[in-house]
Amino acid sequence: MSKAKKIYVCENCGYESPKWFGRCPVCNVWDSARELKFEEKVNAGIDSRIFLLNDDLIGGEVRRIKTNKEEIDGLFGGGIVPGQVILLGGEPGVGKSTLALQISDLISKRGKVLYVSGEESIKQIGIRAKRLGIKNNNLYVSIDNELEAVFVNLKKISPVFVVLDSIQTVFSNKVDGVPGGILQLRTVVEKLRKYSKESGVPILLIAHVNKEGNIAGPKLVEHIVDTVVYFEGEKTTDLRILRVIKNRFGPSGEIAVFQMMNTGLEELKNKVFIEESNMPGNVISCVYEGTRPILVQVQSLVSRDRISTSRRISHGVDVRKLIILSAVISKHLNLPIDAHDIYLNVSGGIKITDPASDLAIASSILSSLFNKFLGKVVVIGEVGLDGSVRKVRDLEKRIENAKKAGFERFIIPHNKKVYGNKIYLVKNIRELQEIIFEEGENEN
């Protein structure tokens, strides 16, 4: 027995309400309510399963599906878990389909893989596969847009891994609505999730992003899947940065770095974010993104303001952090920062959130303001509102990582452990300023 049920869903953020609303109370977008109708099953004799959370249920370590590529496996916390549903988002042309096809090729060495494309023809996929050097007998390709036809193919070949490119083009004939609409998107992803959990077959869903840079229908999709991965960085460069936003089977915030080549996406290591420079304003730091330390280059340009209101423009760091650190420098060093424009950039297009970058940002601003280059030094530390320099986690690992890249001089928070005569220990930004004046090189 079933009965009809009707709800209203915000097409922008996915907010649900039993009544129509003019403006969404969550995202405040007007006229975003869309009516959804579906059949709600009513069963008096519900069959429910219940399990005891004991040693038998918990079991041992989950055997992950590995691609044997360090960057890809590390991105998912050591490999892909059976039954894991992964959502891959990014701008058009950034490399989503290329990466998905490469992962499919790697996993096809373990068994059959089904790659479902709703946007390209078989010929187009073949051209990409030839460019990537992919040719094997375990990688199957389908161009079906209908979900029911996809399930027929899944039953026919019993794959170990499935890719859908993209979910906005797939539709179910069981429900109304256009492909990519709220009802279709929700139905397609939910049915695929159910199949993945019951069969243990991991699924990779490729999704478009909207003009704000978010996956279309974020609340409807991101809440359903296990893992959400975004491409970030500049599409105009050959660098491709993948960041995990959500992961039920590993740490979120992990990143993987690739370079787009003619043969596909190639793995890269830490120093890709650093370019040798002896200009003032360039400072190196070591930050944590997920569970790995990486070296980044912070660049600042401080120029005298010619108008009444100074500007703060930041790329790669939250502009609010730049505003706060500028205020701290102005207050505790009594410097006329308020009368200057400050432009901040993180090389390579990576976005950093680690507070351990605070001291490097402050050093970069002071270096540009005084026109002094700090030299080949790595700056690590958090800056408080009182101007103090605070300790950060895993400082030893950060220093070790930087030494492997050839760095020997460091400016770090004051610590009981002394690492050598090339270590500068600072308690506050005033001591940082003194180091910049003593050790900095003037740029003529």
Image (cartoon, rainbow, N blue to C red):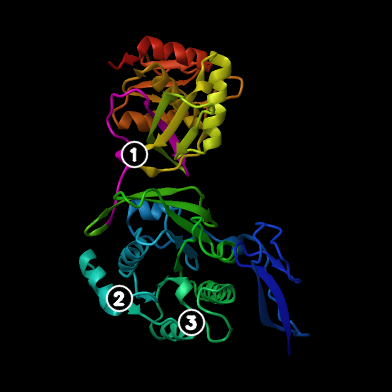
To which quarter of the image does residue 390 belong?
top right
| Residue density around tag 3, few if under 14, some if 14–19, many if 20 or more, within 10 Å | many
Task: Assess whether mark 2 and mark 1 are in contact (beta carbons under 8 angstroms).
Answer: no
Alpha carbons under labels 3 and 2: distance apart: 22 Å
Q: Which residue is under mark 3?
A: 147
| Residue density around tag 2, few if under 14, some if 14–19, many if 20 or more, within 10 Å | some
> The disc labelled 3 sits on which kind of residue?
Leu
Q: Nearer the viewer, residue 174 or 50?
A: 174
Determine the secondary structure under disc 1. helix
Mark 1 or mark 2: which comes first in sequence?
Answer: 2
> The disc labelled 1 sits on which kind of residue?
Phe
Q: Which residue is under mark 2?
A: 138
Mark 3 or mark 2: which comes first in sequence?
Answer: 2
Q: Residue at x 53, y 55 (%)?
A: 246
Alpha carbons under labels 1 and 3: distance apart: 42 Å
Residue range highlighted in magenta? 265-290
Q: Residue at x 40, y 37 (%)?
A: 346
| Residue density around tag 1, few if under 14, some if 14–19, many if 20 or more, within 10 Å | some
- Would residue 143 be visible to someone looking at this image? yes
Q: Which residue is under mark 1?
A: 273
Image position of 206 with respect to 334: above or below: below
Quarter of the image for the C terminus: give it.
Answer: top left
Task: Assess whether mark 2 and mark 3 are in contact (beta carbons under 8 angstroms).
Answer: no
Q: Nearer the viewer, residue 344 or 311?
A: 311
Query: Is residue 332 inside the magenta stretch?
Result: no
Question: Which x, y percent locates residue 25?
Answer: 71, 58
Alpha carbons under labels 1 and 2: distance apart: 37 Å
Determine the secondary structure under disc 3. helix
